[in-house]
Amino acid sequence: GTTGAGGGVAVVDAGVDYNQPDRNGIMCDMTEYADRGGRYGINGVPGMDPADPMDDHYHGTHCAGIIASQWDGVGTSGVASGVQLVAVRVAGRQNPIESADTIRAYEYLAEAVDAGLPLRAINNSWAGRTMSKAFSLAATKLGEKGAVTVIGSGNHAADVAKIPMTASVPAPTPEAVAVDAPDSSGPPPSFSN
């Protein structure tokens, strides 16, 4: 991966296990940029502690590792070594992703960028069956502040041009991009949208 990438990457997902050894030293201290949430980000799931974005489903932790795990001779190394991660929990084992929670997460990130957070990208490795104009506007707002929204196209073997899904958001939003899952030889696997 790229070393010394710098800047921040927000992982909007089921949270991030910030105690996992490969996350040591790469979690951004959000107390420098935000008055709400906690040290490593925010938990936007209603009814949960907003200061604790700990992952209970491990999908967000998996994505965070792909992005920025530090090579220490054991485990993995991320594709953008040197970035600081921001954990933004909007889902979990018992909590599906809701549009309103995602919009509030983007508002939190926009406030942090305004306070000086050098956010470069927002990872959204999830897809849904609904498009949201509000999500598109939130992605545009953060894009205008310098942070590109990256959206997973999903794993439903569907044509997102024919079936509205979250990955359709980048069409009217130049500040966002949808990505597919490749297999080991390069082309998308059969389950990728």
Image: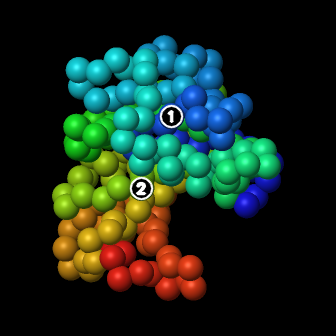
Q: Residue at x 36, y 75 (%)?
A: 192
Q: Are marks 1 and 2 in contact (CB under 8 Å)?
A: no
Q: Vertically, is 40 above or below 171?
A: above
Q: Is 126 situated left or right of 11 in this image?
A: left
Q: Residue furthest front?
A: 74
Q: Closer to the camera, 59 or 31?
A: 59
* Quarter placement of the N terminus: bottom right
Instruction: Find the distance from the CA under tag 1 to the CA under tag 2.
Output: 16 Å
Q: Position of residue 100 (x, y in %)?
A: 23, 37
Q: How many marks?
A: 2
- Image height check: is 114 above or below 76? above
**Nearest the camera: 150 or 126?**
126
Residue drawn at x 66%, y 47% is 69
Label 1 SS = loop
The residue pinned by badge 1 equals 17
Q: Is residue 20 left or right of residue 156?
A: right
Mark linked to residue 125: 2
Q: Amino acid at mark 2?
A: Ser
**Left or right: 188, with 6 as reference point:** left
Q: Position of residue 78 (x, y in %)?
A: 66, 54
**In the rendered view of the protein, which quadrant contains the C terminus?**
bottom left
* Quarter of the view holding residue 105: top left
Foreground: 166 or 184? 184
